[in-house]
Image (cartoon, rainbow, N blue to C red):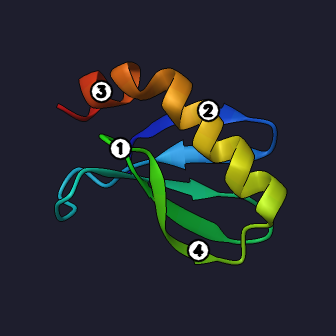
Amino acid sequence: MPELLRLFGLRFFFYSNDHDPPHIHVRSSDGEARFTIETVSCIENNGLKNKDLYLAEAIIEENKEICFNKME
């Protein structure tokens, strides 16, 4: 599982053989969430705190071009 970024206690990664739509997994010590990339939104949350969800969404939005390039 390639790691894209590690920032503020959040780890951003993807699985190379994962299903559509393209999405990013975000993990912290509290849990994990998945975000779509094209239109950044949380599609699943398993324990991430709200503040971490908002932070992760902002980080993905700011870096989504990088994410798309690394996932190809």
**Residue that numbered label 4 is attached to:** 45
Quarter-of-image position of residue 6: top right
Among numbered discs 2 and 1, the one appearing first in the sequence = 1
Disc 3 versus disc 4: nearer the observer? 4
Crowding around mark 4 (Cα neighbors within 10 Å: few <14, some 14 to 19, many 20+) is some
Type of amino acid at the residue the image marks with label 2: Ile
Please, is residue 21 above or below residue 70 in the view? below
Which of the numbered marks, if any, corresponds to residue 70?
A: 3
- Residue corresponding to mark 1: 39
Task: Tell me the kind of residue under disc 1.
Answer: Thr
Give the quadrant of residue 7: top right
Which badge, 2 or 3, comes first in the chain's sequence?
Answer: 2
Q: Which mark is residue 8?
A: none
Q: Earlier in the sequence, mark 3 or mark 4?
A: 4
- Give how far across and how far down residue 8 sits, in percent: 81, 37
Q: Which quarter shows the C terminus?
A: top left
Q: Secondary structure at mark 2?
A: helix
Q: Residue at x 61, y 68 (%)?
A: 32
Tag 3 secondary structure: helix
**Tag 3: amino acid:** Lys
Q: Which residue is mark 2?
A: 59
